[in-house]
Image: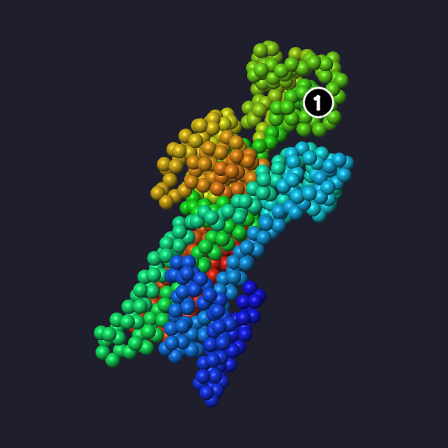
Amino acid sequence: MKKKGIKIIIATVLFFIAFIINFSHKWINNTIYIISYIIVGLEILRKAIRNITRGKVFDENFLMTVATIGAFAVGEFPEAACVMLFYQVGELFQSYAVDKSRKSISSLMDIRPDFANVERNGKLEKVDPDDVKIGEIMVIKPGEKVPLDGYVIEGKSSLDTKALTGESLPRDLVEGEEVLSGCINLNGVIKVEVTKEYEESTVSKILDLVENASSKKSKSENFITKFARYYTPIVVIIAVILAIVPPLIIKDATFSEWIYRALSFLVVSCPCALVISIPLSFFGGIGGASKMGILIKGSNYLEQLANTEIIVFDKTGTLTEGVFEVQKVKAINISEEELLKVTAYSENYSNHPISLSVKKAFGKEIDEKQIVNTEELSGLGIVARIGEQDVLVGNEKLMNERQIKFTKCNDIGTVLYVAIEGKYVGYIVIADKIKEDSIKAIANLKKNNIKQTVMLTGDRKDVGEMVSKKLGLDKVYTELLPDGKVEKVENLLKEKSEKGKLAFVGDGINDAPVLAISDIGIAMGGLGADSAIEAADVVLMTDEPSKIVNAIHLSKKTMRIVRENIIFAIFIKVLVLLLSAFGLSTMWEAVFADVGVSIIAIINALRVLRVKNK
């Protein structure tokens, strides 16, 4: 781009020398114009000849070559040089615009790891990430990128996840936690056991998504491609007719005059503004989304987001944290700490999410010597002997079966009733926590004219309805198996308008079939299952539902810019084409209608990069 800029400056200086100074011999001025033309136009001439030999005749290089050589032929040296000069200025603007769009995702591409430090035979080896196998131990030092996905087995640190998720705040990391490739280790040295090979790692999948996004074209891009394919040959034929027919049938008409009109017609006819600015708008939209931690797999999905009418959500892990936590502890005749202790000891040998949440809430080391015996009763709970006490932990059925008088808890969630030595001592309520971001997301979606917000869940009716009520959803369907979710989405697809789209947002393995049949599948990428991410069209790297609002806002702005460019470019071109045909415009107006419109359209397309988080 720098080299092209220097060429344009030199050619511009020569052009103005010839334009301003009237040398005693006109051929000197014309020679300077030709030199200026060759400096900026030789590349275009070569491309035109090369494309003709390959059978690709009717492109912008051909049009510019024919128009400018024709201008020289009729003695319009200044205009021929100026047309090529302005065309190259437009190309420079295009290069700048594309470069700026690419830079919008360059920070994302920087997540590609260059090496991995792996412990082998007691030594640390620097190897290519592709050569690291599952189960090997990586040592990641401060300032280094995490090469592959894994679990921390030693050390603690903070991670910069900005390139991966768009989040500016570092994430603290301790032993036992999962670490995703592409993050940057900020301070401590950590040892990570590899769980995925490079091709299956987070960083590899993200890079693949971004690199292949441009291959899935939107309807607007496909329209422009077809438009240019048929439009260009038609205008060339019209230009030839314009140059030959009028002088033969109109009295006093000259070939030089009508050839000049035809050449102006050709210059105007270049569909550059449309061919360049439309794909650039979508490319910029995809790049702008990636900066916000939203990966859109193609411009066709970016276009569809603008027409979203119905959004269907999975519950667990999408609108809720997907992590069970103790929400309430009610102790009777003993302390809350003692109630938590006997429950945690009773649940010690279980890996059920409910048991893990109780142990986490207890937060102290469990002395397993005090656990004399535990027995799990299917569908009821646990019977345990803790020290010298018999403990019952379970549901209402367990309390009723053992004929223990208890006070029923009506809180929403999983309730663990606890009895010691046959006496009821209280209960613990455990529930999945609603994401703080979810309420904001649903409210903002309704402001963006989303007609329906729906939740599908396999949870009990009372739990699903409680979550739905708190979030302000329009509909909720509960106690659904995966095939039930598919059936509900198929029914909802019938409720949207002809142009409207349905988006499904999910994160789990059982969401993959629904993501696939929806118009737009949106997956939670941070914690979501690999199968869900593969089936989805859009991936939210931060697991925040509010990112959907940002994606829709960005898609609407992109489509608005695309429509503006199409209407503006076609209107100006048709106007100047008519003026050229009737001899009411010169090649200077033709230059504006081609290069000027292209530059304006490109600058307008770059506006999409300025979209910010809502």
Q: Estimate the x, y position of residue 133 in percent, counting from the top left.
A: 65, 36
Q: Residue at x 40, y 78 (%)?
A: 76
Q: Where's the N terminus, which quadrant?
A: bottom right
Residue 93 vs residue 466, the one in the foreground:
93
In depth, the one of 402 and 345 nearer the eye is: 345
Q: Is residue 503 above or below residue 374?
A: below
Q: Residue furthest right?
A: 122
**Residue 481: x, y in percent?**
47, 26
Residue at the image position 69 percent from the left and 40 percent from the top: 172
Q: What SS does tag 1 mark?
A: helix
Q: In the displayed orientation, state which residue is furthest to the bottom.
A: 24
**Residue 132 percent location from the top left of the image:** 66, 38
Q: Amino acid at mark 1?
A: Lys
Quarter assignment of residue 562: bottom left
Residue designated by label 1: 341
Would residue 387 be found to the left or right of residue 21 on screen? right
Q: Residue at x 22, y 78 (%)?
A: 251
> Residue at image x 28%, y 68%?
241
- On the image, the x and y values in percent for residue 175 come to 71, 34
Q: Residues within 10 Å of mark 1 (few under 14, many from 20)?
A: some
Compared to residue 361, the image places residue 564 above or below, namely below
Q: Residue furthest front?
A: 53
